[in-house]
Image (spheres, rainbow, N blue to C red):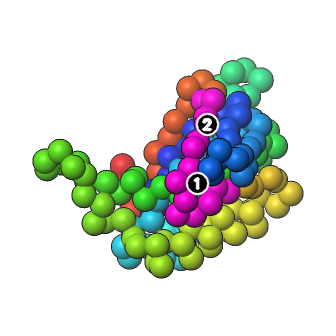
Amino acid sequence: MRAVLQRVSRAAVSVDDSVVASIGPGLMVLLGVTQGDGARDVEYIADKIVNLRIFSDEDDRKNVSLSDVSGEILVVSQFTLYADARNGRRPSYDRAAPGEIARPLYEKTVETIRARYAGGRVLTGVFGAHMGVEIVNDGPVTIILDSSKLF
């Protein structure tokens, strides 16, 4: 499982020109699922999203987590995180899990984030929809996570 976390001042997702979710300060999470992902991947990614210390403390050091700043989270599925563009000019998406596998893992990840971030606002895009995503990156701060710890 892969996640791209962006610290944002605001973010929104639209489907058919209608806003379906929007947040203020917090994290925009683009989440991709690959073949073979399971419960351990869900736990790893959810824990990192909630507890990664990428927000500034009073000394302007990235030393506090989302929980410490009471930020919001917007999670959007993005199978293209598993694109392989090493050969040719058209990326291959063979490593991305098909929807019938990816959707339950995506939903379980969102559910796990909500459980670990009790009381925090966690919103989502629409799985499988063509979405317009607006992100105002704060910093900019962008972190890439991989549950296989490839990087």
Q: Where is mark 2, residue-wise?
A: 134
Q: Is residue 66 above or below residue 92?
A: above
Is the N terminus in the top left, top right, bottom left or bottom right quadrant?
A: bottom left
Is residue 126 one of those drawn in magenta? Answer: yes
Q: CA distance from mark 1 to mark 2?
A: 12 Å
Which of the pair 71/86 is nearer the observer?
86
Query: Is residue 74 visible to the viewer in this orientation of the structure?
Result: yes
Residue 27 drawn at (x, y percent): 66, 43
Residue 113 against residue 54 in the figure, above or below:
below
**Residue furthest out toward the front:** 16
Q: Position of residue 95 (x, y in %)?
A: 31, 65
Q: Is residue 2 above or below residue 136?
A: below
User: Would you say residue 107 sits in the magenta stretch?
Assistant: no
Residue type at mark 2: give it: Glu
Q: Amino acid at mark 1?
A: Val
In this picture, residue 79 sits left or right of residue 63: left
Q: Nearer the viewer, residue 11 or 25?
A: 11
**Residue 134 picture quarter:** top right
Residue stretch rendered in magenta on the structure: 124-137
Mark 1 or mark 2: which is in front?
2
For the point 81% across and 53% down, the residue is: 120
Q: Which residue is mark 1?
A: 76
**View extreme (top): residue:** 59
